[in-house]
Image (cartoon, rainbow, N blue to C red):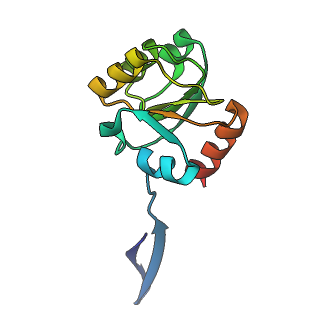
Amino acid sequence: MEKAYLNLEEGGDKLYLMQIRIKEHHAMKVSELVKELNLMVFSGGEGLDREISGGYVSDLLSDVMENSSEGEVWITLQTHCNVVAIACRKELACVLLVSSLAPGQDTIDHSNERGIPVLGTSLSTFEIAGLLFQKIKT
């Protein structure tokens, strides 16, 4: 969607009308990412309306705690329930498990309680990170 803004400038005894178009940024939602990348939703369906601001790739929980930012998609191979706790604390958009990994029942339960989507893909970390970058940065 584009918004039009008008700017009037005075030059001597003439008035100039200039139109500037600024493309409005559309924040992608987790539900859109699921659809576009054909991702599996394991749990946390209540959080599918979360907006995505970027992505973070790491399998070290301490690294994610220190360096991830609100609204990011966390791409990881970690499947235990601590990923949901960290995603919740850091207000991440979702957790995305790679390489056909699946969360345990305790992770699913925790995700549903907190409304943090846990998603899955058969793609490798490298492949899904590249696709995510293309989707949210273009």
- Would residue 118 be found to the left or right of residue 116 on screen? right
Give left or right: position of 123 versus 53. Answer: right
Residue 68 appears in the figure: yes
* Residue ranking furthest to the left: 113
- Residue 48, placed above or below residue 17: above
Write down the quadrant of residue 71 in the picture: top left
Q: Residue at x 48, y 13 (%)?
A: 80
Determine the residue positioned at 49% across, 47% down.
34
Q: Position of residue 116 (x, y in %)?
A: 36, 30
Up-down: is 60 above or below 132? above
* Quadrant where the image shows the N terminus: bottom left
Up/down of 45 relative to 56, above or below = below
Q: Position of residue 29 (x, y in %)?
A: 42, 48
Q: Can residue 71 be seen? A: no
Q: Position of residue 99 (x, y in %)?
A: 66, 29
Q: Residue furthest top?
A: 62
Q: Could you say which is closer to the camera, residue 104 or residue 118?
A: 104
The residue positioned 56% from the left and 17% from the top of the image is: 78
Residue shown at 57%/49% (left/top)? Answer: 37
Residue 36 or 69: which is nearer the viewer? 36
**Would you place residue 7 above or below residue 61 in this image?**
below
The image shows residue 56 at horizontal and vertical percentages of: 57, 29
| Quarter assignment of residue 60 | top right
Of all residues, the one furthest to the front in this rendering is 105
Q: Of all residues shown, which one is farthest toward the bottom?
A: 14
Question: In the picture, which quadrant includes the C terminus?
Answer: bottom right
Q: State how many labels appear.
A: 0
